[in-house]
Every structure is written in structure tokens, then in C-alpha cells.
Amino acid sequence: MSFKADVMQVLGADAFRKGLGALRQTDVGHISTRHPRDITGSADVDASLATALPNAARWDYVVGRIQGNVLHTHWIEVHPANAGKNVHEVEKKLAWLTAWLQDKPLAAYPRDVVWIASGKSAFNARSPSIKALAAKGCRFVGGHLHL
């Protein structure tokens, strides 16, 4: 299968967008790339699953990107990072993502799970709560992700 086919199978026929096209206008500015052609596509996980899983702590996006000859998935959460409660919210979303991905074809790709601050951040990479989150598999990148 392909990333596009896997996204469509798991998130619905209308979920896949070329490039970073699935990202909301408010979020797309938090991500950049020097090689846009390496971005194979994206999907708004949150919007795609809102009807089916309205009470779930859904993750925001998945982006497919070719690195070398291998497709990697970047699971991106754009979320406030100005208080300790935000770490707990992202931990809850990460737990949901991990459980949800278990039996999905999208789990087969190498992945990078990332939290991007949607505004001013109260954290840095040395914060104990951020280190604990990283140990669970989610990188905090501050306000911008460069793919």
C-alpha cells in the first residue's frame, strides 16, 4: 500500500491532501521544509475522526515525508504550551494516539511524534515534564517544526 491509500483506508476517502494541505491555516505556519517535494501528503486526523470519536483526545495531523528512500510519518500536535496542564493534555492525546494506531496500517511506517507550541511556550527541552514526555515518545519542538 501507499501512504495515501493507508490514510484513505484509516481516515476516510476525503482525508488525504497533497503536501501540507490538510493543515489548518492557523497551524501551517508552524511547519516548514526545505524540500517540499519530499512531503507526500497530510491528513487532519482530528477533523477526520471527530464524528466517529467525538469524545476522544484526538491527535491533530499526520504528514508523510520521504527520507532517503523510506516514507516516514510525522504525527503533529499543535497545542498550547503555556502551563503544566498542557503537558497532561498532550500526554492524554499521546496515549490515545498510541492505542489508536496499534492495529492501523499507518503504524507500519517509521514515525516521529511531535508537539508544536501554538503560541508562547513556558517550556524548554530541559524541563522535567518535557523530558518525561520525550521518554513516552513525543518530542516537544517549541513553536516551529522544520521537516
Image: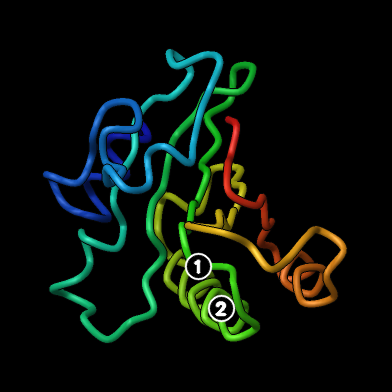
Helix, strand or loop status at disc 2? helix
The location of residue 83, given as percent across then percent down, is 61, 79
10 Å crowding of disc 2: few (<14), some (14-19), many (20+): some
Helix, strand or loop at label 1? It is strand
In the picture, measured across the screen, residue 97 lies left or right of residue 15, that is: right
Quarter holding the C terminus is top right
**Neighbour tally class for label 1: few under 14, some 14-19, many 20 plus, Cα within 10 Å:** many
Q: Amino acid at mark 2?
A: Asn
Where residue 13 sits, quadrant-wise, is top left
The residue that disc 1 covers is: 80
Measured along the vertical axis of the image, is residue 53 above or below residue 32?
below
**Residue with the mark numbered 2:** 86
Location of residue 87 by image quarter: bottom right
Colour convention: rainbow
Front residue of 29/8: it is 29
* Label 2–label 1 contact, CB within 8 A: yes
Query: Which residue corresponds to the image point at 82% horizontal and 68% vertical from the top-left?
Result: 131
Give the quarter of the figure containing the N terminus.
top left
Q: Residue 60 appears at what percent x and percent y?
A: 38, 59
Q: CA distance from mark 2 to mark 1?
A: 6 Å
Q: Is residue 85 left or right of residue 55?
A: right
Determine whether 115 is above or below 97 in the image.
above
Q: In the rendered structure, which amino acid carries the disc numbered 1?
A: Pro
Q: Is residue 29 above or below residue 66?
A: below
Q: Earlier in the sequence, mark 2 or mark 1?
A: 1
Outermost front residue: 120
Return the x and y of residue 22 as percentages of the image width and height: 26, 41
Identify which residue is drawn at 47% across, 69% down.
97
**Residue at position x 59%, y 46% in the image:** 111
In the image, 145 versus 132, the foreground residue is 145
